[in-house]
Image (tube, helix red, strand yellow):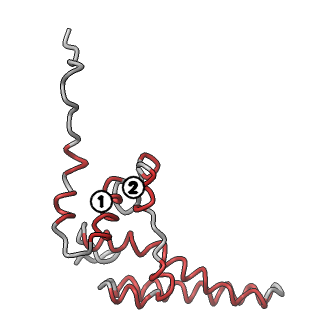
Amino acid sequence: MSAQSPYAPPKANVEADAGIAEIDSLPVSETWKKRFRAMHRAGGPNLPKLKELAPEDRKHASVFNILAFLFGPFYYLAKGMWRKGIVLFVLCLIGILVLDFVMVLAGLGKYANATGFGAAAVFAVLANRDYYSKMVLGRNGWWWSK
């Protein structure tokens, strides 16, 4: 019978701490490091383990980026993610034009001006995940690397 001693220290989760040292050496602010650590604990940019995190870490991992909401593709340009910023801008522009056209045809033209907020929300929700992918994982887009 090989029962674990109740006085033995808990086993360290080596896999969870493997990327933390790499995050600590990145040339970003402490705020970004805190976000990156929380995103790392949540399982990466897709955040599959988000519900398992403590509330404080969950808040840092799933932040709505207000600067990306306000500046959209310019924020992506400033962070060095210009390719993805251009592609998202074009996709959002096409989506807005199609949605506006459908809304005008349906007689809801006065509400069509609000569709721009949807595009801004796309940038705000994706910005932190994309920046994590760029800085921690070394991916700067969908099909191209670095």
Q: Position of residue 48 (x, y in %)?
A: 42, 53
In which quadrant of the rendered view does residue 114 lie? bottom right
Judging depth in this view, the residue of 18 and 141 nearest the camera is: 18
**How many tags in the picture?**
2
Identify the residue at horizontal 15%, vertical 67% (top origin).
Answer: 25
What type is the residue that disc 2 sits on?
Asp
For residue 22, which quarter of the picture?
A: bottom left
Q: Nearer the viewer, residue 106 or 129?
A: 129
Q: Give the percent coordinates (x, y) of residue 131.
A: 33, 74
Instruction: Looking at this view, name the residue that lies furthest to the right.
Output: 107
Determine which residue is flagged by label 2. Answer: 57
Vertical comparison of 37 with 51: above or below? below
Side of 10 where 133 appears, left or right: right
Residue under the image location 40 percent in, 85 percent down:
85
Q: 22 or 118: nearer the eye?
A: 22
Callout 1: SS = helix
Q: Left or right of 129: which side holds 17?
A: left
Task: Tell me the SS state at disc 2.
Answer: helix
Residue 82 falls in image quadrant: bottom left
Q: Residues within 10 Å of mark 1 (few under 14, many from 20)?
A: many
109 in relation to 12, above or below: below
Marks 2/1: CA–CA distance: 8 Å
Q: Earlier in the sequence, mark 2 or mark 1?
A: 1
Which residue appears at 23% of the width and 41% of the height? 13
Quadrant where the N terminus is found in the figure: top left
Residue visible at 45% across and 82% down in the picture: 68
Q: Are marks 2 and 1 in contact (CB under 8 Å)?
A: yes
Q: Mark 1 sits on what residue?
A: 37
| Tag of residue 109 | none
